[in-house]
Amino acid sequence: MMNELSDWKHELEQLLSTNNATVGICFYDLDRHKGFSLNGQQKILSASMIKLVILTELMFRVSKQEISLSDSICIKHSMKTGGDGILKELQNEHSFSLLEIATLMIIVSDNEATNILINLLGMDAINKRASAMNLTQTSLNRKMMDSESVKKGMDNYTCADDIASIFHKIYEGTLINRQFSNIMLELLQKQQQGERLQRYLPEDIKIAHKCGDLNHIEHDGGILFLPNTTYILIVLTSGVSSALEGKRLIGKISHFFYQKMEELL
């Protein structure tokens, strides 16, 4: 397997050699317990991948019984946030449970839901959770759609290896514990944003994943459940010329690993 991985890495480097984007990749075969990274520690603007850490801190606080997933939040006009999401389109004064808020944050990448959770949990606590998880390049430094903070040089970061570590712990049931890992896995399997890792794969491939995008940035990462094997693949891209180019690039890399895993069977 190690020789094969070395060959795969070389082939992948060749595949990416004509692309000018910065690409961070982490692959891990969950059945054979082997993998590799390509620029896996490259620090990249996280876009919505940071929402995985926010979700983890939420579940940790619930596990400590400090809050409950059934606790409700009443949506106020002051909470309105642009970008992805549906809460911004709804009338004020609706109440949602924390589980529903978390679900919206993950499956449609709702920015208003995300900011509600940042306010509830605290940015410092979320960053301490990232540190406790040994996420070396991951930090939350601003809320979603906070252009003023961006102008001041404050932004959110991560790397492919950090995101892979989160998914690995979820898969093994060690991110908090099996109960909360399973809740997170279930949410990630309901992800409604595709067009990246799944782009060139058979439609019936099951995947638990999270996407992210900003101008010239496209990310996707998660666990792919093939009929006879399971693996983690994280692809973070920065400097792509367009959203479509970034999605195609992620799709091409994903198809590369899919073919390699199929050949092993």
Image (cartoon, helix red, strand yellow):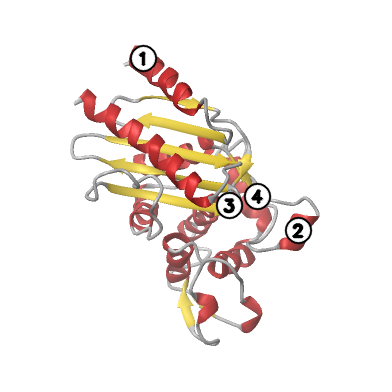
Q: Are marks 4 and 1 in contact (CB under 8 Å)?
A: no
The amino acid type, in three-letter code, at marker 1 is Met
Mark 2 packing: few (<14 Cα in 10 Å), some, or many (20+)?
some
- Residue drawn at point x = 57 percent, y = 47 percent: 217
Horizontal side, residue 197 vs residue 240: left or right:
left
* Farthest-out residue, top: 3
4 vs 3, front mark: 3
- Residue drawn at point x = 46 percent, y = 77 percent: 96
In this figure, which residue is indicated by the disc labeled 2?
A: 149
Query: Residue 2, which numbered label?
Result: 1
The amino acid type, in three-letter code, at marker 4 is Asn
In this figure, which residue is indicated by the disc labeled 3?
A: 47
Mark 3 packing: few (<14 Cα in 10 Å), some, or many (20+)?
many
Q: Are marks 4 and 2 in contact (CB under 8 Å)?
A: no
Q: State the CA–CA distance, disc 4 to disc 3.
A: 7 Å
Q: Are marks 3 and 2 in contact (CB under 8 Å)?
A: no
Q: State the CA–CA distance, disc 1 to disc 2.
A: 44 Å
- Position of residue 57 relative to residue 202, above or below, is below
- Which sits earlier in the primary sequence, circle 3 or circle 1? 1
Horizontal side, residue 248 vs residue 121: left or right:
left
Question: Can see residue 31?
Answer: no
Query: Residue 156, which numbered label?
Result: 4
Question: Can see residue 29?
Answer: yes
Q: Secondary structure at mark 3?
A: helix
- Position of residue 68 relative to residue 92, above or below, is above
- Residue drawn at point x = 77 percent, y = 62 percent: 148
